[in-house]
Image (cartoon, helix red, strand yellow):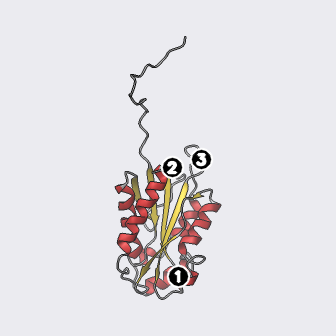
């Protein structure tokens, strides 16, 4: 039997509501600076209607499968890359809490995988890092925690969503450079708009 849907002239054809998009923002923070940036990025995502959860790798184990529509990774740059047990121990000697030494984003990524049943094409991933102004700015495009995190995530089956983003602190321990919190929130909004196709 053929059923026709009659719509009055000039009326819009109704569309089923789309489900809200979701994001998981996973971060590592030695002295609190990357944590502050994470909250700003998450606020930018939420401001565009993306349901956003933040996860501190120091206190949370990785899920077996990432089901969010977007994975965002944030970490401080240690020796031009993601931290490891040696560089985290050095951060503890400089004043970071000892609970930050056990595991970082590098270790979290080893166990993280996209849920291909929910996202057959892969889960999009974006990454940012926090580094001192005194590092060579000409190395930003190739060195740093964010490019390293994206490379590792790609090996795990995640799909790049954006170029790596860099935020700065005035010195190794902080504070954040002026305007970086606002820039992080704006980056979160851009990620959200790209995710929902606006």
**Residue at image point 43% right, 33% down:** 16
| Badge number at residue 27 | none
Q: Nearer the viewer, residue 157 or 184?
A: 184
The residue at which mark 1 appears reads as: 87
Q: Quadrant of the N terminus?
A: top right
Decide which of tag 1 and tag 2 comes sooner along the chain.
2
Mark linked to residue 116: 3
Could you say which is closer to the camera, residue 173 or residue 102? Answer: 173
Judged left or right of residue 117, residue 58 is left
Q: Circle 3 — which element?
A: loop
Element on which disc 1 rests:
helix
Q: Residue 37's quadrant in the figure?
A: bottom left
Vertical side of 31 occupied by 184: above or below: above
Residues tagged 1 and 2 counted as in contact (Cβ below 8 A)? no
Residue 194 visible in rendering: yes
Write down the residue under mark 2: 67
Count of marks placed on residues: 3
Q: Secondary structure at mark 2?
A: loop
Where residue 83 appears, x then y in whole percent?
Answer: 53, 76
**Which residue is at a point 35% across and 61% down the rendered structure image?**
43
Query: What x and y, as percent, mark residue 192?
Result: 44, 56
CA gap between label 3 and label 2 equals 8 Å
* Residue at x 59% of width, y 57% of height: 158
Q: Position of residue 181 (x, y in %)?
A: 36, 72
Q: Of the residues under marks 3 and 2, which one precedes in the sequence?
A: 2
The residue at the point 50 percent across, 58 percent down is 71
Does the image show residue 55? no
């Amino acid at each position: 039997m053929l059923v026709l849907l009659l719509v009055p002239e000039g009326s819009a054809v109704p569309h089923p509501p789309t489900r809200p998009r979701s994001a998981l923002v996973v971060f590592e923070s030695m002295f609190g600076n990357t944590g502050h940036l994470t909250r700003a990025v998450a606020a930018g995502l939420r401001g565009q209607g993306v349901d956003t959860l933040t996860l501190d790798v120091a206190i949370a184990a990785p899920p077996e499968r990432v089901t969010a529509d977007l994975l965002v990774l944030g970490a401080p740059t240690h020796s031009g890359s993601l931290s490891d047990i040696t560089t985290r121990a050095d951060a503890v000697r400089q004043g970071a809490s000892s609970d930050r030494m056990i595991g970082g984003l590098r270790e979290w990524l080893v166990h993280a995988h996209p849920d291909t049943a929910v996202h057959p094409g892969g889960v999009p991933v974006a990454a940012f890092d926090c580094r001192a102004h005194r590092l060579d700015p000409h190395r930003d495009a190739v060195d740093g925690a964010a490019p390293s995190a994206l490379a590792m995530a790609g090996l795990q089956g995640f799909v790049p969503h954006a170029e790596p983003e860099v935020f700065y602190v005035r010195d190794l321990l902080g504070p954040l450079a002026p305007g970086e919190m606002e820039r992080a929130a704006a980056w979160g909004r851009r990620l959200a708009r790209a995710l929902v196709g606006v």
